[in-house]
Structure formats: C-alpha cells, structure tokens
Amino acid sequence: MKVVLVGCGAVSEILYAKALRQLEQEALITTTAIVDPNPSRTAVVGVSLPGARQCATLDEALASGAIDLAIIAAPHKFHADQVVACLNASVAVLCEKPMAMTTAECDRMNEAAERSGRILAVGHFRRFFPSCQIIKTMIATGALGAVRSFRVLEGESYSWPAQSASFFKRQEAGGGVLIDAGAHTIDLLLWWLGDVAHLHYQDDAMGGVETNSVLRLTMTSGATGTVHLSRDWPLPNRYVIQCEHGWVTYICDEVDRIEWGFHDPAYVMATRVAAAPSFMECFVNQLRNVVAAMQGREPLGVSGVEARKTVALIEECYRTRTLLAMPWLEPAEVIRATRLAHV
C-alpha cells in the first residue's frame, strides 16, 4: 500500500514518521512521498523515511499517481481542501484531528468520501488505548451503574514543539486549546457518554486564541460534568467519571492503566492491562486499523462521520462562548477584555 504524508510539522516528525517506518519494516506500506512547502521540514522528516520523494505541494505528490492512502497532518485550515483533493483523486485519507474547523467543512469532506467510495479516517488515536477501551466497555455494560457526573482537568504549560505559528492564529487553527488538545478530550467524552443535550462554554480569548477554557455539559443521558482545559496552567490531567455504584478514572496518556472503585471506600483499585502496547504502538495501531479497513479486514476505528460530532460541539462552544471570569482584572480592564472578546 502506497502512502503519502502531507505536512512535516512536529506531529509528523515525532509520531507519523516513526509509525510509517515501522509499518514499512512490517511490509504493510511504502511511503512514496512526503509533502511540505518548507524544504527544511521535508528534509528533517525524510531522515526517517529515506525512500520517500520530498514534494513542495500535494498536487506534486498526487501527480505521480498510484497512491492508496494520504495522511493529512498539515495545519488545521488546510484539512478540508487537502482531504477533498485526495478523495477526488480516489485516494483514501487519514486526517489529523481536528477533522476541520467547521461542520460545513466536515460535510464537504464526508460528501467527497461518499462520492469516491474511499475511506476517510480521523486521527482520534486515544480510542486505541486499552485504558480508554476498558472505560468504554465499563460504561456501555453498566458495570458501575449509570453515569451520574464527570470532571475533566487536562492542561500543562504549552510544550509542543510546533514548527509554525499556525497553532496561535485563529484564522489558521480555528481556535486555541479547545480545538487543539480539546479535540481529543471531546472525542473521548462523546465516545464514552453519548450525545450532548446542553452546554455552557467560557474561555479567555480576547480577539486571539484561547489559552484556558471551561465547558459545562449535560448529556442526553442526564449525566452532567465539567471540562477544564489549559495551555498555561498545570492541571492533574485526569478524567473522573462518577457512576451509580462507583467511579472510574482515566489518567491522560496512560495507555495501560485505569483507576476505579465502588463508593464504599474499602474497595479502591487500579487495573493494569497485561502486555499492553506502548503509547507509540497504540499510535501505530491506528494506522494498522486504517490499512485493515481499506482491505476490508476490520471496521474503521474513527470515521469522518463520527469525527464531525466533535467539530460540531466545538463549533457550538465557540458560537455561544462567553468570557471566562478573570477576577484579578480591574473594572476598566474587564470592559476592555469584553470588547476584545466580542461577547
């Protein structure tokens, strides 16, 4: 299977290049081209994928023909156009999260996938963590009873080695922490808990992208919860889900371990998955799933239709956003901040 990698930023250098190299060693795929307008970036990623042509544009890569799968890892604003171009060329796609910046873009992408008959997958790879899969099963089977409430605290001082300023420009990224790291958070909550009935959203964006956000959700099941996300505030990085008979905790990026217990404090335990894959292996498993789905051997893990739900929720947050309370501001500063926030 011939693969092209589009976008040679940090996620490609740190994750995709290694994953593709491993699948090449397993003789599952061949990386035929890597694409980025910055030749220094294709050179860096090309060290891990020496057999791939280094192209400046997607059109250049597609012109060579005989491509089976494109991985779109470019800045958010390019996702929709690049995905549609690949699907129109009868090339299957794995698109990095977020799928797009708006539901209108998602719809255009999904329509192109339906027309072409090719797969459109989206990179919400936390679904491939055994820890997240166990929680999905516990909730679905009612092992601890119905979900009553949840609290998510996810954040750190921003440390991702971004290779461009696109993450910090609303027109290019679509937003800040919510649409970036929060896309993983929202995807897990919707996957575990189902649809949202009501939301209330606040952030600290004042004309730019948000660094901190607070989202209060009521699910159609009746469960309620709060999500705190931050790019500058170290948070516990834990999801705690309270159920009728007990609770379960996911620790961010721990792929092989959850904590859970009954409300009786005598029963608190941790479960570790024996012989679980590593974080990197889980990321590789996402690509393995896409290849297997293209070959008709497995159902697709995360489709464009499913990923649209995350974008829709984020879009609704931004549409209804209010300014996050910042009590350290003087009254005149609050007035100025509110004007800048356009709320």
Image (spheres, grey):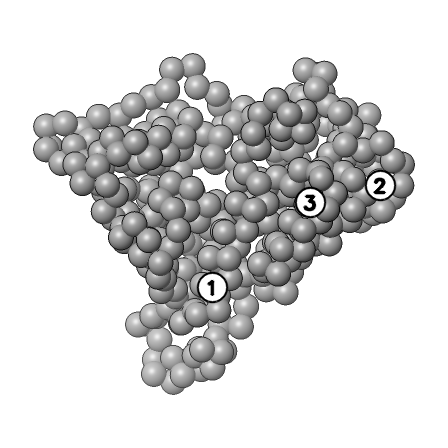
Label 1 sits on a secondary structure element that is helix
Q: Residue 18: in sight, yes or no?
A: no
Number of marks present in the image shown: 3
- On residue 113, which mark appears? 3
Residue occupying the point 38% across, 15% down: 274
Residue occupying the point 84% across, 40% down: 61
- Left or right: residue 194 versus residue 85 is left
Observer-nearest residue: 217 or 142?
142
User: CA gap, disc 3 to disc 1?
Assistant: 24 Å
Residue occupying the point 68% across, 15% down: 26
Residue holding disc 2: 62
Identity of the amino acid at label 3? Ala
Q: Position of residue 168 (x, y in %)?
A: 58, 59
Q: Quadrant of the rendered structure where residue 329 is?
A: bottom left
Observer-nearest residue: 302 or 340?
302
Label 2 sits on a secondary structure element that is helix
Dot 2, how many residues are within 10 Å of its Cα: few (below 14), some (14-19), or many (20+)? some
Label 3 sits on a secondary structure element that is helix
- On residue 337, which mark appears? none
Mark 3 or mark 1, which is nearer to you?
3
Dot 3, how many residues are within 10 Å of its Cα: few (below 14), some (14-19), or many (20+)? many
Q: Position of residue 13 (x, y in %)?
A: 66, 36
Q: Residue 297: in sight, yes or no?
A: yes
User: CA gap, disc 3 to disc 2?
Assistant: 17 Å
- Left or right: residue 136 versus residue 109 is left
Residue holding disc 1: 316
Residue occupying the point 39% across, 64% down: 201
Q: Please report whichever mark, 3 or 1, sits nearer to the chain's N-terminal start.
A: 3
Identity of the amino acid at label 2? Leu
